[in-house]
Image: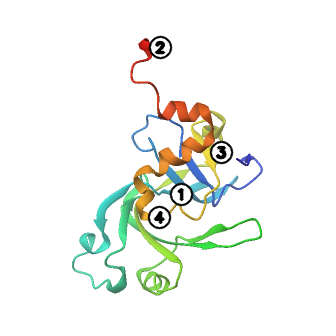
Amino acid sequence: MREFQPETESLAGALLLAHPSLRDPNFEKTVIFLSMHDGENGAFGVVLNRPSGRRLNELMPNQDLGSLSMVPVYLGGPVATDQLLLAAFRWEETPEGGAWTWRHDLTFETAGEVVQEEGTILRVFAGYAGWGQGQLEKELATSTWLVHTPDDEILHPDLVGMLWKGLVGTHGPVFQFLLNPPENLGNN
């Protein structure tokens, strides 16, 4: 795993994995895609692994959504949960292997156009995760989050249920143990 230096380096495009000991119900066992991170404005991201079980047409039944009607809605985080955020993700090959590009400023009109582009994944998020200036850096210093470089599979719909556990487990044997402790420690 590559070590990030959040004090001097933007984490935009990285994943935040909730530490197994994090018990905040807003973030327990979450995988967050950081869309924005800088020292002056703080950080902004969306939770990737909390599907609402609903599609956009269920939330907006009286709207003609066209190609957007079946887009899944995810619980993006605890901020502005009454607002919908339309985001487009696309995997781009790079000399280093690849990276996700994203847009989270889409209108319904532009989202309808973007969803037609091959290789683009569109998601709708109810709410988002946000941090003020220096707040995320403090949480990283106390190991609230693990920073993870995403691969091209993170948005595959079949992986949502196991995404957090699968990614945290790649951070070494200690985390593998924390994810799969013995049923009764007294028997050891």
86 or 82: nearer the viewer:
86
* Residue displayed at 71% across by 66% down: 97
What is the x, y in percent for residue 159? 44, 57
- Evaluate if marks 3 and 4 touch, with contact meaning CB atoms under 8 Å apart: no
Query: Which dot, 3 or 4, sits closer to the camera?
Result: 4
Query: Which dot, 2 or 4, sits closer to the camera?
Result: 2
Query: Counting residues from the N terminus, which is met first, the one under dot 3 or under dot 1?
Result: 1
From mark 2 to mark 4, how far is it between C-alphas? Answer: 38 Å
Question: Is residue 80 placed above or below 24 in the rendered structure?
Answer: below
From mark 3 to mark 2, how far is it between C-alphas? Answer: 42 Å
Report which residue position mark 4 lands on. 156
Residue 119 vs residue 38: left or right? left
* Residue displayed at 61% across by 58% down: 150
Q: Secondary structure at mark 3?
A: loop
* Residue displayed at 41% across by 81% down: 108
Residue 44 vs residue 157: left or right? right
- Evaluate if marks 3 and 2 touch, with contact meaning CB atoms under 8 Å apart: no
Q: Residue at the left extreme?
A: 62
Q: Amino acid at mark 1?
A: Gly
Q: Which mark is residue 134?
A: 3
Q: Amino acid at mark 2?
A: Asn
From mark 3 to mark 4, how far is it between C-alphas? Answer: 32 Å
What is the x, y in percent for residue 145? 58, 41
Query: Counting residues from the N terminus, which is met first, the one under dot 4 or under dot 1?
Result: 1
Query: Counting residues from the N terminus, which is met first, the one under dot 2 or under dot 4?
Result: 4
Report which residue position mark 2 lands on. 188
* Residue displayed at 66% across by 66% down: 99
Q: Which mark is residue 165?
A: none
Q: Secondary structure at mark 1?
A: strand
Question: Is residue 21 visible in the rendered structure shown here?
Answer: no
